[in-house]
């Protein structure tokens, strides 16, 4: 019975990869880039994804990069990664979504968790990183109005390629 469950799970993952692959092709993302994004999205754990972002930040010359421990969110102000560069603090929320796009409700939830940190640290830079995308203009406006940077799947691919992670 476990074997049947396992086979069903693998088939589900294959279907999700196929759906994601179709979406990416429709949005002019090439074969190698699709492979890279599917690997990041489906083959890494959420913690591995955070460490991938830490690696990319390190390559971009950020310092004091810390990845949160699951129960220590207060130290990280509800963000997954805290880094420094040129005397500024950078907070990163990492979302490794397999079949969900970024919508306004999720952004509101994120903003609610960082509001006091933003208020008490006006020079802090907040970034929302996702393996997905923003579907609607209202969500994009919300990020812009609240000075939250956004890295979607296309920028994530470019960032990885800059450090030749597409060749591994």
Image (cartoon, rainbow, N blue to C red):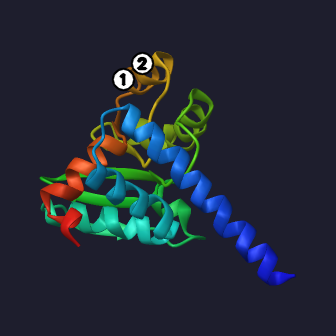
Res. 132 visible in picture? no
Res. 161 visible in picture? yes
Q: Could you tell me residue 103's position as x and y percent?
A: 56, 31
Between the C-alphas of marks 2 and 1, the distance is 5 Å
Taking the image as shown, residue 18 lies to the left or right of residue 51, namely right
Residue at the right extreme, as displayed = 1
Q: Could you tell me residue 167's position as x and y percent?
A: 19, 68
Q: What residue is at 46 percent from the left and 22 percent from the top?
A: 142
Taking the image as shown, residue 32 lies to the left or right of residue 37, namely left
Residue pointed to by mark 2:
141
Residue at the bottom extreme, as displayed = 2
Q: Nearer the viewer, residue 16 or 43?
A: 16
Dot 2 crowding, Cα within 10 Å, few <14, some 14–19, many 20+: few
Q: What residue is at 74 percent from the left and 67 percent from the top?
A: 8
Taking the image as shown, residue 28 lies to the left or right of residue 47, namely left
- Residue 133: image quadrant is top left
Looking at the image, residue 132 lies above or below residue 50: above
Looking at the image, residue 61 lies above or below residue 70: above
Q: What residue is at 51 percent from the left and 73 percent from the top?
A: 69
Q: What residue is at 80 percent from the left and 76 percent from the top?
A: 4
Q: Quadrant of the C terminus?
A: bottom left
Dot 1 crowding, Cα within 10 Å, few <14, some 14–19, many 20+: few
Q: Are marks 2 and 1 in contact (CB under 8 Å)?
A: yes
Q: Nearer the viewer, residue 127 or 48?
A: 48
Residue pointed to by mark 1:
144
């Amino acid at each position: 019975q476990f074997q049947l469950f396992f086979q069903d799970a693998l088939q589900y993952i294959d279907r999700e990869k196929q759906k994601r692959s179709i979406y990416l092709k429709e949005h002019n993302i090439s074969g190698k880039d699709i492979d890279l994004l599917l690997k990041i999205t489906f083959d890494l754990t959420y913690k591995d994804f955070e460490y991938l972002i830490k690696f990319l930040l390190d390559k971009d010359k950020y310092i004091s990069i810390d990845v949160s421990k699951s129960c220590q969110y207060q130290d990280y102000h509800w963000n997954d990664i805290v880094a420094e560069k040129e005397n500024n603090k950078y907070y990163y929320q990492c979302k490794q979504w397999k079949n969900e796009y970024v919508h306004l409700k999720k952004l509101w939830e994120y903003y609610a968790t960082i509001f006091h940190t933003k208020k008490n640290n006006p020079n802090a830079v907040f970034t929302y990183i996702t393996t997905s995308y923003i579907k609607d203009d209202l969500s994009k406006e919300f990020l812009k109005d609240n000075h939250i940077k956004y890295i979607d799947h296309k920028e994530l691919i470019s960032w990885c390629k800059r450090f030749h992670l597409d060749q591994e």
